[in-house]
Amino acid sequence: MKKLLSYLFALAAVAFAFTSCEDVPMPYDYPNSGNNSENVDPNAKGQSADNPYTVQEAVQLIKDGKAPTTEVYVKGIVSKLDFYNSEYKSLSYYISDDGKTEDMQVYSGKGLNGADFNSKYDLKVGQTVVVKGVIKSFDKKGTTIYEVDKNSQIVSIEGEGSSDQPSDEKGQSKENPYSVKEAVDLINSGKAGNTEVYVKGIVSSVDYFNSKYKSLSYYLSDDGKSKDLDVYSGKGLNGADFNSKSDLKVGQTVIVKGKLELFTDKSGNKIPEVSQSSEIVSIEGSGETPSTGDKGQSKDNPLTPSEAKDIASALGEGNTSTESYYIKGKISSIKFSFDAEHGTATFNISADGAKSAEFTCYSVYYFGNKSWLEGNMQVKEGDEVVVYGKLTNFKGTPETAARKACLYSLNGKTE
């Protein structure tokens, strides 16, 4: 009898254990358990290349908070090629239903069937694409951008398109660019906007080559004679690097693509400009090589202290110019007079000798780039000097590079 009771108790314990297991949650989700999965109809809208969302439908889903977290298919026309990432071999571009507006960004996407892009121009404006990827939105400085997230891929491409999108609207294509005067008028009236436009002009001055960013600052005008529009730190043809100041010639006609803005320098001057990172899309003519009479390149046409300060500031912190410049001014203050031990002097100059808008001549040698010796002339406040040498941006301070500049003239004397 005791054995029978023990057996019955054992059966009851086993039955209770199996029943209790139904109340214990699984430590992980089995496939098709229903957790975090979506039952997607492959024939539903946006779930195949044969039945993709339009761009407007995709954008509306995002706006309504109903965008799937899984990949969908979106069909649109390429309206703009934005940025090629050479590291990831991907391309950021815009699509819309009509190919004229930037309704949805395809961010850092791959090419046909996931292939790498090899350049910005592997895809053409005007081509119709079906893209497979996750759709979402993000905030960019207060502006909502609707996008296909990174790592998308194109599953079909139709049409030949073009590398640039012609437009009937003034300034929106290289076929219909703004003149320099039209661009300057837009800037001065506050109507320049924040999108890239096309401007055609003649190079009137090649100002400065930035060896770090491989860019050039130069001026344009409609007649090639005046400095009406400053193209600041721009790139070359189709975004290529510049290798020297002589890569662009005064007199050449260019079409530049970039953003317009009104820049205020440290002296309060308002300068209409094409902002940093523009690119040239067309160059015509051979122009002429800038002469040695260019500003700062000869003793007869030296930089002012303010101009030297601007050029050194534009170098970027820690950088030194590849070229040497002549700078003329009056000594406004002296930090270290010439002495035989160091052979150099450090002083500030300004246009009129006042202690404002000063430029620092740091550790400059004497005449002939030689060390100063006892018995040589000494500098004093109020002296008119011309200093020749390289410029630098030392921890944010624009000045002559230490021991890479010298005194060229002192009150008209050169020796």
Image (spheres, rainbow, N blue to C red):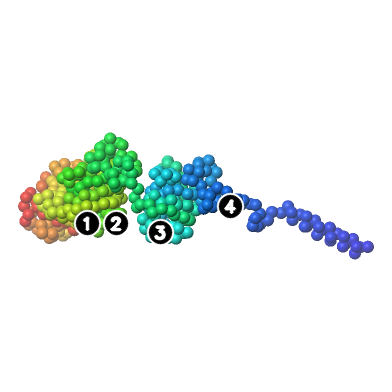
Image location (x, y in percent) of residue 149 = 47, 51
Q: CA distance from mark 4 to mark 3?
A: 29 Å
| Residue 59 visible here | no
- Residue 240 image label: 2
The residue drawn where x is 31% and y is 37% is 191
| 368 shown above or below 309 | below
Q: CA distance from mark 2 to mark 1?
A: 11 Å
Residue where numbered disc 1 is placed:
247
Residue where numbered disc 3 is placed:
117
Describe the element under mark 4 as helix, strand or loop: loop
Circle 2 Cα neighbour tier, 10 Å, few/some/many (<14 / 14–19 / ≥20): few
Q: Nearer the viewer, mark 4 or mark 3?
A: 4
Describe the element under mark 1 as helix, strand or loop: helix
Describe the element under mark 3 as helix, strand or loop: loop
Nearest to N terminus: mark 2 or mark 1 = 2
Nearest to N terminus: mark 3 or mark 2 = 3
Q: Nearer the viewer, mark 3 or mark 2?
A: 3
Q: CA distance from mark 1 to mark 3?
A: 29 Å
Nearest to N terminus: mark 2 or mark 4 = 4
Describe the element under mark 2 as helix, strand or loop: loop
Q: CA distance from mark 1 to mark 4?
A: 56 Å
Q: Nearer the viewer, mark 1 or mark 4?
A: 4
- Report if the CB atoms under discs 2 and 4 are less than 8 Å apart: no
Image location (x, y in percent) of residue 322 = 21, 58
